[in-house]
Image: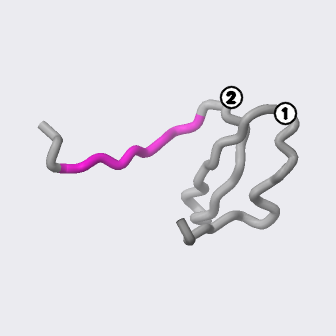
Amino acid sequence: MTYFNWAVGEPRNDRSDGDYCVTFNVLTGTWYMRCCSVTFYYVCEVDGHHLP
């Protein structure tokens, strides 16, 4: 993947407090690293040919 849209100061490399996941800010379109133990909403992409 060559496209990226990290927010200023991201991605952080100080992962001393656990695993990190990428989150998306819908207002700015930028990506952030957040602790994976925090609950966030999510979006999945599926192939439309397999929908009922």
Is 21 in the magenta? Answer: no
Q: Where is residue 48 in the image (x, y as percent from the top left)?
A: 20, 50
Q: Main secondary structure of the magenta part?
A: loop
Q: In this view, does 36 lie to the left or right of 10?
A: left
Whole-Å distance between the Cαs marked 1 and 2? 10 Å
Give me the disc on residue 17.
1
Q: Where is residue 50 in the image (x, y as percent from the top left)?
A: 16, 42
User: Range of the magenta residues?
Assistant: 40-48
Furthest residue to the top?
37
Q: Quadrant of the C terminus?
A: top left
Circle 2: residue type: Ser
Q: In this view, does 31 lie above or below 14?
A: below
Question: Residue at point 63% right, 48% down?
Answer: 22
Q: Which of marks 1 and 2 is nearer the N terminus?
A: 1
Furthest residue to the front?
1
Q: Is residue 44 left or right of residue 50?
A: right
Q: Name the residue under label 2.
A: 37
